[in-house]
Image (cartoon, grey):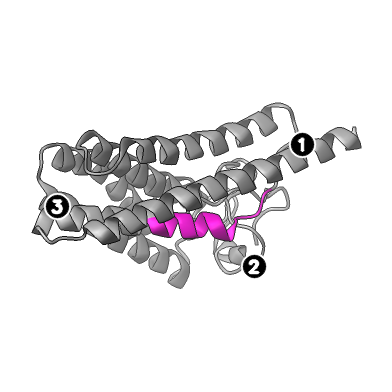
């Protein structure tokens, strides 16, 4: 299992591996860490095949941005789809063949969040999705990261479990991006579905912010009362 100083913190995507206390921003908690934690040894940071796949996904980010901003929507759609498939592949390899590493705990959520945020920003620049939605999605991530960093700076590391609403929000974000890219790439009419998905993403993002802020405030107040 992971070392005893492991921290239970935020999970942006449900596919991230367990991380040690040195990776406060992204980690799984509880039963989610079972199995994945058992194949990681402390200090294992050498590149494995899953790590290389994850690195390739990170390198795809600027290419996807170029494709969207250049109007090459089919390329963008295929690359985003390939990124999702590679995510599943590296997760399978890490768990099935014991290739999970501490480095992967850092790289995997970084690759996932970089891809999603970059696509939303690029789609906003291209006026393919409302810019207010882009601002909302990006602001949520900045707020969460900022809250975690602040709690660590004041020596009161937050210990929030991954919320169901956050996982649903991530799924909705991916679905919306795929629908928008697919509609632009292949010219089919998905206006109603895209509008519906936009509302769903906005609502889930706001709910996620509210729940995380409430949990963070509760944690900080509890820490104050314990001092």
* Span of residues in magenta: 160-172
The residue indicated by pointer 3 is: 184
In the rendered structure, does residue 169 fall within the stretch colored magenta?
A: yes
**Disc 3, SS:** helix
Sequence-wise, the earlier of marks 2 and 3 is 2
Q: Quadrant of the C terminus?
A: top right
Residue 208, disc: none
Q: Quadrant of residue 174?
A: bottom left
Q: Nearer the viewer, residue 171 or 40?
A: 171
Query: Looking at the image, can residue 83 be seen?
Result: no
- Our reading of the magenta stretch's main secondary structure is helix
Q: Nearer the viewer, residue 209 or 144?
A: 209
Q: Which residue, given by chain and number where applicable, does mark 1 sit on?
A: 220
**Which residue corresponds to the image point at 42% horizontal and 56% vertical from the top-left?**
200
The mark that comes first in sequence, 2 or 1, is: 2
* Mark nearer the viewer, 2 or 1: 1
């Amino acid at each position: 299992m992971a070392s005893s100083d492991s921290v239970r913190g935020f999970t942006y995507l449900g596919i991230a591996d367990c991380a040690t206390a040195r990776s406060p921003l992204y980690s799984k908690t509880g039963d989610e860490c079972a199995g994945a934690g058992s194949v990681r040894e402390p200090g294992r940071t050498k590149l494995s095949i899953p790590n290389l796949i994850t690195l390739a996904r990170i390198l795809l980010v600027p290419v996807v941005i170029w494709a969207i901003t250049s109007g090459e929507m089919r390329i963008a759609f295929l690359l985003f789809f390939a990124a999702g498939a590679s995510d599943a592949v590296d997760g399978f390899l890490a768990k099935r063949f014991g290739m999970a590493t501490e480095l992967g705990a850092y790289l995997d959520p970084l690759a996932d969040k970089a891809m999603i945020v970059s696509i939303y920003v690029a789609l906003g620049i291209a006026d393919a999705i409302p810019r207010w939605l882009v601002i909302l999605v990006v602001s949520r991530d900045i707020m969460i990261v900022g809250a975690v960093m602040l709690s660590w700076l004041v020596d009161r590391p937050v210990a929030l479990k991954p919320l169901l609403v956050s996982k649903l929000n991530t799924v909705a974000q991916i679905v919306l991006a795929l629908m928008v890219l697919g509609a632009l790439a292949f010219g089919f009419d998905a206006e109603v579905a895209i509008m519906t998905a936009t509302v769903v993403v906005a609502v889930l993002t706001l709910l996620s912010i509210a729940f995380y802020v409430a949990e963070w405030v509760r944690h900080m107040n509890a820490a104050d009362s314990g001092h």
